[in-house]
Amino acid sequence: MPTVLRNRTYRHLFAAQVVALVGTGLATVALSLLAYSIAGSDASAVLGTALAIKMVAYVTVAPVAGALAGRIPRRTLMVTMDLTRAGVALGLPFVDRVWQVYLLIFLLQAASAAFTPTFQATIPDVLPAEGDYTRALSMSRLAYDLESLFSPALAALLLSALSYGWLFVGTTAGFLASAALVVSAVLPKPGRSPDAEPGAETGRGVETVRGVDTGRDVETGRVAEAGLVRRTGGVYHKASFGTLLFRATPRLRALLALDLAVAAAGAIVFVNTVNVVRDHFHRPAGAVSLALGAYGVGSMLTALLLPRLLARVSDRAVMLPAAFALPGILAVVAAITAAPAGPGSWLALLAAWALVGAAGSAVLTPGGRVVRRSAADPDLPAAFAAQFSLSHGCWLLTYPLAGWLAAGAGLPVTAVVLGAVALAAATAATALWPARDPDTLSHLHTDLPLGHPHLADARPTGGGAWRHGHHYVIDQHHHRWPRLPRPTPDRASG
C-alpha cells in the first residue's frame, strides 16, 4: 500500500484529503454537541434534519459539479471549494439558532459536493494502473477510518480544556491546509477532455485500425473508443449522463442498493449517538467521541484487510455478505437500547458501532472499483458525481428517518425500522447484481453504419447487424445492457 505514496501528486492529494477529513471529523463531534446544547433531548431530530440538508446539497450540487469538472481546471475548483468550506466553518461557533445551523450546513456541504467528485475523478488519472488504483481506494477508505478514530480522540482531548466551539476552528484549519496541499500538487491532464476531438493524445498507448483511433488501450486491451469520440451536449446533458449510466448498468444499480443498506446503519451512528450516550447511558460529552471512535476502529481494520482480500475474491463476494450483516447488527442495537443501561450494555454498544463501521467499510471501499469498471475514462467525472449524488440520496432518506423516528418513537424502534431498510436493500442488491458479471460482453449493433470505426473488429450477422465483444460500458454507442448469453462452446472464445 505505501508504494502509491511514492507518487508525489497522489501523496499531496492524499495528505489534502486526510487533513480535510480531520477537520470534518472535529466538526461532526462539535455539530452533535451544538445541536444538543440548542435542542437538548430533541438533538436527534435537529441532527437528522441538518444532515438531511447536507444530503440535499450533495444530491443537487454533485451532478452539476461533475458536468463542470471538464470545463473548470480541477485544481482551481478544489482549492476554491476548500476556501469556501473554511470560511463557512469559521462561522459555525457563532450560531445560536437552529435555522442558522441549517443554512451554514447547506453552504458547507454544497462546497463539499463540488470538491469530492472532482477529487475522486482525479485519482484514476494520477494512478492509472488497476492495482495502484485499488490501493488508493483502500488508502482513501483508510483515511476516512482514521478520521473516524483520530478526530473523536482529538476532539475528546480538546474538549477537556476548551469549549466545543473551538473544534470548528480546527475544521477551518483543516480546509486551509487541504487547499495549500492541492495547490502544491502537479495534477495530470484528464485522459480525455469531455469535448476533445477523436485522435487527440490520451497519454496512454492506443491502437489504430484503418487509420482511425479506436481507443484500445494497448496495455490493458480495454476498448474505450466510445469514450474517445466527441462528447456533445451542454451541462445538463453531461450532468444527467451519470444518472443514466447507473440506471442502465446492473452492477451500478446494485451498488446504489448497497449504499442504502450502509446509509440505514450509518444513520444510527451519526444521528443518534449523542442521544444514546447522553440520555440513555448518561455519560459525559467525551463519551460521544469514544463511541464515534469505536465506529472508526471497525472501519479502519476492515480497510486494512481489504486489498489482500479483493486480490483473491470479487467485489460482489465481499460487498453482499457485508450488507447482509448490517440488519443483524441493528437488531442487536435495538436490544441494547431497549434494555436498562449498564457497563455491559455500554461495551456492547461500542462493539456494535465497531461492527457497523467494519461492514460499512467492506461495502464502501470496493465501490470505487465498481464505478471505474463501469464507465469509459472520459465519463469517470460524471460517473463519480452520479455515485456521490445518488449514494447521498440514500442518506437523505435515512438521516431524517433516524432523527425524527428516534425523537418520536424511541431508539429501539428506530433501530428495527432501519434494520428492515438495510435488509430490503441488501436483498435487492443481490437480485440486481448478476452472479456472472464479466467485463467483456458479446453484443449486437444494429444502428451503426457500415465502416464505422467502432465496428472495426465486428463480424456481420445478417440483416445489417454486427456482433463483437469488448469491455462493455454504457455510452453513446451502447444504450442498454445486453443480455448475458448462456455459455456455449462456440461463444466461449468471444
Image: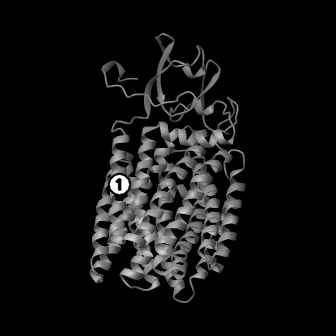
Q: Amino acid at mark 1?
A: Ala
The residue sitting at the bottom extreme is: 161
Q: Which residue is at a point 33% across and 39% down the rendered structure image?
A: 435
| Figure disc tally | 1
**Element assignment for label 1:** helix
Left/right of residue 47 with respect to residue 192 in the rendered view: left
Left/right of residue 471 with respect to residue 413 in the rendered view: right
The residue sitting at the top extreme is: 462
Image quadrant in which the C terminus is located = top left
Percent position of residue 104, x then y: 64, 69
Q: Which residue is at a point 35% across and 24% down the rendered structure image?
A: 492
Colour mapping used in the image? one colour
Q: Which residue is at a point 67% across and 29% down the rendered structure image?
A: 198
Left/right of residue 67 with respect to residue 427 in the rendered view: right
Q: Residues within 10 Å of mark 1 (few under 14, many from 20)?
A: many
Which is nearer the eye, 399 or 273?
399
Residue 286 versus residue 465 in the image, above or below: below
Q: Which residue is mark 1?
A: 323
Residue 416 versus residue 120 in the image, above or below: below
Percent position of residue 49, x then y: 52, 66
Q: Quadrant of residue 481?
A: top left
Residue 19 versus residue 200 in the image, above or below: below
Does residue 313 appear anywhere in the picture? no
